[in-house]
Amino acid sequence: QFGGVDYITKPFQVEEVLARTETHLALRRLQERQEKINQRMQRELTLAGAVQSSFLPSQMPEVEGWQFLASLQSARETSGDFYDVIQLPNGRLGLLIADVVDKGVPAALLMALSWSLVWNYAIQYPDSPQTVFAEVNRRLLMHLGGSQFFTCFYGVLNPENGTLVYTNAGQPPPFHLKQGKKHFDTLGRTGPPLGVLEEGQWDQVEVALQAGETLILYTDGVTDACNARGELYGVKRLRDLVERKGSESAQALHDALLADIDNFVAGELQYDDTALVIAQRK
């Protein structure tokens, strides 16, 4: 109650007092050392988070007739989710969202490797998401031997005609909101996560986004957001919100989704990152 951690009964011996004192001085030195280690680790995590953030685009590309929005909310100092809108050599855009296995520093390191691999092969094979995934998978297995993996959606968008050629390696199926319709299509999985199977294969699928249509990419941190009662935000709640707000602008839809998640979790600490990318054809 008063902060004491030890006591000596009378009559006491000088040797015992000295021994007890030395013990507590040693414990204090260990405590101070641990505090310094913790402070150093916190500084390193903060720096790692800043470096990791530099991988993400500082702003979305401005393309006539389109609007792109994205956000990432990390559950820790570092994140396992990432996204990008890659400007490809042929004038097309690579829409990317991904989620690596694990949390904390291991996830941050895998995120950096995964992002660099996808970006590199996206530039090399600007017309073939299927080939991008095959090459990324090969390199991950070469370096990590199947011990770590990540899920990823990657699509090549032609802004001129709205066609999107995509592959989906285990990511939650994005929503394709069609013009004048309350309901929407989902862009399902076309293959396994990357870094798992040597013989993994990924199909390519082509869809078209017409004027007024919207594409919503998200990681499972959205549907796995949890409130104080242990309830998950869930796919149904997400679908209901998209159906209500789907006809609004990309900015309004983006803000409404983040606000609804915040209201649902009501300040509860989250254990998974949340990434969101919205592409809307005007």
Image (cartoon, helix red, strand yellow):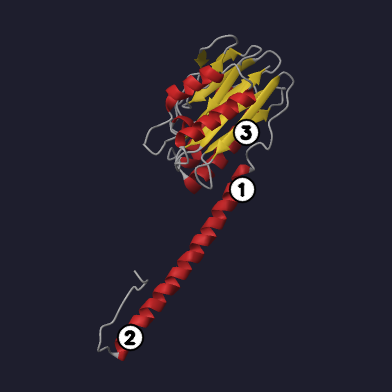
In the image, which is nearer the foreground, mark 2 or mark 3? 2
Distance Cα–Cα, label 1 vs label 2: 49 Å
Please report the residue visible at 42 percent of the width from the left and 73 percent of the height from the top.
Answer: 28
Total label count?
Answer: 3
Numbered badge on residue 17: 2
Please report the residue visible at 33 percent of the width from the left and 84 percent of the height from the top.
Answer: 19
Mark 3 neighbour density, 10 Å: few (under 14) some (14–19) many (20 or more): some
Residue 87 to residue 40: above or below: above
Please report the residue visible at 33 percent of the width from the left and 81 percent of the height from the top.
Answer: 20
Horizontal and vertical percent for residue 276? Answer: 56, 30
Front residue of this view, candidates 101 and 32:
32
Numbered badge on residue 275: none
Numbered badge on residue 50: 1
Mark found first going from the N terminus, 2 or 3? 2
Residue 6 to residue 266: above or below: below
**Judging from the image, what secondary structure is the residue with disc 2 in?**
helix
Q: Label 1 sits on what residue type?
A: Ala
Numbered badge on residue 119: 3
Mark 1 neighbour density, 10 Å: few (under 14) some (14–19) many (20 or more): few
The residue lying furthest to the front in this view is 1
Q: Label 2 sits on what residue type?
A: Val
Whether residue 234 sits left or right of residue 121 in the image: it is: left
Is there any visible trace of residue 136 in the rendered image?
no
